[in-house]
Amino acid sequence: MRIVDLSVPVGPGTQVYPGDPVPRFTVHATVREDGFNLLHLEVGSQTGTHVDAPYHFRDDAPRLHELDLGLFVGPGVLLDVRGAKARERITWERLSPYADRLGPGVIALICTGWSAHYGTPAYFDHPYLDADACRRMLDLGVRTFCLDAINIDETPDETHPGDGYPVHHLIAEAGGVIGENFRNLEQVDFPNPIVSCLPVALENADGAPVRAVAMQLEE
């Protein structure tokens, strides 16, 4: 009935995490010269809307191709925390009203509204998930955490050193996955959405770009 695109476009203008590879697209072949069009792509594994495998933060954890694809497709639950301020922790107090809808197989969509800042320096000053709130969600059985910001943990800078990416480590230890740089989460305004964030099938990877969507299906 309806498909909401949750992904940012990938191209030379894609905003990346500080220090990550900047996407580069060059023309490899053209119809005029070669009879077909073909692009040469250079992108990082965490480019654009993407998912992290546990291997992203643990050498002994599963890599992308080793994960159950069920982690990337399932019923979505929108956790609306819009109104959170720059660099504010998203605590369990904000998320507890949704607790009865969280459980195994659920894809948690943490809607901060911060995708409105995409492409600006303010995008790096996003709200982020509190470690205790993450533990509580893991205890409820959640293993897929997606949000409309560049990092589920605080993004460090010169004045904000961060605290060592605790949420990344907690989810990796639990064998879960993280989706970052989602957008349009506020448009998932229908009941029982089905979310797909299947990654490119990269071997031995820490993560990969996705074309994430939320679908409203007929009853």
Image: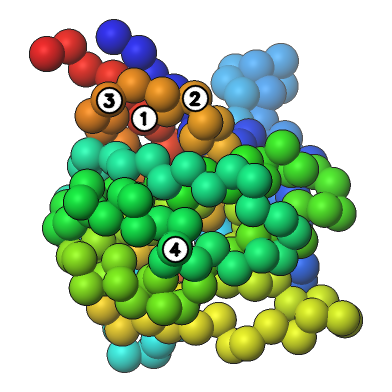
Secondary element at tag 3: loop
Q: Which residue is mark 4?
A: 93
Residue 216 sits above or below residue 53 on the image: above
CB contact under 8 Å: marks 3 and 2: no
Q: CA distance from mark 3 to mark 2?
A: 12 Å
Indicate which label's residue lies in the foreground, 4 or 3: 4
CB contact under 8 Å: marks 3 and 1: no
Q: Quadrant of residue 31?
A: top right
Q: Which mark is residue 191?
A: 3
Asked if residue 64 can be seen in this view, the reply is no
CB contact under 8 Å: marks 1 and 4: no
Q: Which mark is residue 214?
A: 1
CB contact under 8 Å: marks 2 and 1: yes
The type of residue carrying mark 2 is Gln
Q: Which residue is mark 2?
A: 187
Counting residues from the start of the chain, the first of labels 1 and 4 encountered is: 4
Q: CA distance from mark 4 to mark 2?
A: 24 Å
